[in-house]
Image (cartoon, rainbow, N blue to C red):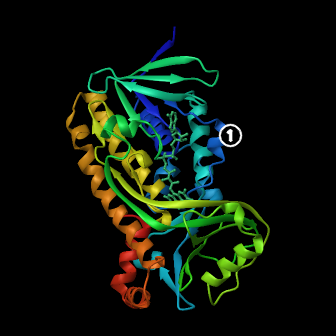
Amino acid sequence: MSQEHRTRVAIIGAGPAGLLLSHRLAEAGIASIVLDRRSRDEIEQTIRAGILEHGTVDILREIGGSRVESVGQRHDGVELRFEGVGHRIDLRGLTGRSVWLYPQHEVLRDLVGARLAAGQDLRFGATVERIDGVESDEPRIVATDAEGQRFEVAAEFVVGADGSRGITRATVAGSSREGYFREYPFAWFGILCEAPPSAEELIYSSSDDGFALVSRRSDTVQRMYFQCDPDVDPGSLSEAQIWDELQRRVPGTDLVEGPIFQRDVLRFRSFVAGRLLRGRAALVGDAAHTVPPTGAKGLNLAVADVLVLERALRALLLERDERPMLAYPQVASERIWKAQHFSWWMTSMLHVAPDATAFDRRRQIGELSSLVDSEAGRMFLAEGYTGW
Ligand SMILES: Cc1cc2nc3c(=O)[nH]c(=O)nc-3n(C[C@H](O)[C@H](O)[C@H](O)COP(=O)(O)OP(=O)(O)OC[C@H]3O[C@@H](n4cnc5c(N)ncnc54)[C@H](O)[C@@H]3O)c2cc1C
């Protein structure tokens, strides 16, 4: 016999989307259970996002114990580099807003800590296998805990915050591939290395050899990426080859090199699910959409979805008003498609496609020059990068 639990909102996934949603629902007096198949350690060691929009930081500041102010670093500008010359985009001067470098695993540590301190029902090692009855008033989740025991959760609403490989997308949208999709013919080779920063602000560099992003983690650990073939094996390059690839893609600067202790290859996809809501189940964050990382939008978009869905859940569960929930897909989609465009635009403008001709490359340089030479162009980038 499987155990049965009851809650108001069952949330699948303890990534930024699921944890933030459960936190905000609790503030509104709505109980939830969050289930994640990974362990707490695995979740808190997720090396992913780094750049947070100013609005995301405002939301995180509201969480008790958040270290975004003390550990995060405010960045008032970014550098666009091409033809060996850097051009600073003054985010703060142009928009009055900045972005913050605060790694995703720190966001997750803050959120997990706040949820557990508040005595919330947060279950690690719990894998959801099935969601039943989403068209009814009492959808049910069937899951297995870390010991392999089956259990069920009956709820008034189910939220799929289970990322791009979760199971809720298929339940809500009909299939995991049902929606709008684009794949790119390149990927990012990402490294973490022990070295001092090479630059004060992030460098987005477009060279004839491809793209590179020089980012940072702390005063002693740096995060860098370079454009690569999607099928490259991360173990196939020596440290010397990796540094050569990076240095060639950031001409005109000398990157400070150091021992590389993590490497991964990140494929690029743009995706928006065909449906974000079905009956009593909705998708948020990467479960609803994926963006290539160039625009640093994924986590920020997850936070934006959560704010819209939280309002809809409060109206539905506290006031029995269904209208905000029915409007959720349309309201969330406005920002989703702005972020899709921004991420696609940054990606296409900065990377060199494998079949690019000399004409394509010269046109790209023309686009980058038009952007940095025009206040309107720099403003467009700054508005999108800091968040609408
Ligand atoms: C290298 C890289 C760099 C990035 N940089 C940025 C950046 O600078 N800025 C930015 O905004 N975004 C960035 N992103 C994107 C960002 O990391 C994601 O958009 C973000 O993690 C989405 O959060 P989420 O909560 O929707 O999903 P996830 O973080 O994927 O969380 C989903 C959770 O669901 C769980 N789960 C899945 N299936 C099940 C199941 N069946 N049962 C139980 N649990 C399940 C998973 O274990 C996981 O913990 C980057 C991503 C990568 C990979």
Residue 96 visible here? no
Q: Amino acid at mark 1?
A: Asp
Considering the image in quadrants, where does the C terminus appear?
A: bottom left
Query: Where, by quadrant of the figure, is residue 190 drawn?
Result: bottom right
* 27, above or below 74, in the image: above
**Position of residue 214 measured from the top left corner of the image (x, y, whole percent):** 61, 74
Residue 266 visible here? yes
Q: Residue at x 65, y 42 (%)?
A: 42
Q: Residue furthest top?
A: 1
Q: Residue furthest right?
A: 259
**Position of residue 325 measured from the top left corner of the image (x, y, whole percent):** 26, 38
**Position of residue 78 measured from the top left corner of the image (x, y, whole percent):** 53, 77
SS for dot 1: helix
Q: Residue at x 65, y 61 (%)?
A: 233
Q: Crowdedness of circle 1 by 10 Å Cα count: few (<14), some, many (20+)?
A: few
Taking depth in this image into account, of 143 and 96 the one nearest to the observer is 143
Q: Is mark 1 within 8 Å of ligand 1?
A: no
Taking depth in this image into account, of 123 and 84 the one nearest to the observer is 84
**Position of residue 17 measured from the top left corner of the image (x, y, whole percent):** 46, 44
Q: So how many labels did they put on this image?
A: 1
Taking depth in this image into account, of 192 and 173 the one nearest to the observer is 173
* 65, above or below 245, in the image: above
Query: Where, by quadrant of the figure, is residue 96 drawn?
Result: bottom left
Q: Residue at x 50, y 47 (%)?
A: 62
Q: Which residue was labeled with disc 1?
A: 41
Q: Residue at x 66, y 78 (%)?
A: 245
Q: Would you say 162 lies left or right of 274 here?
A: right
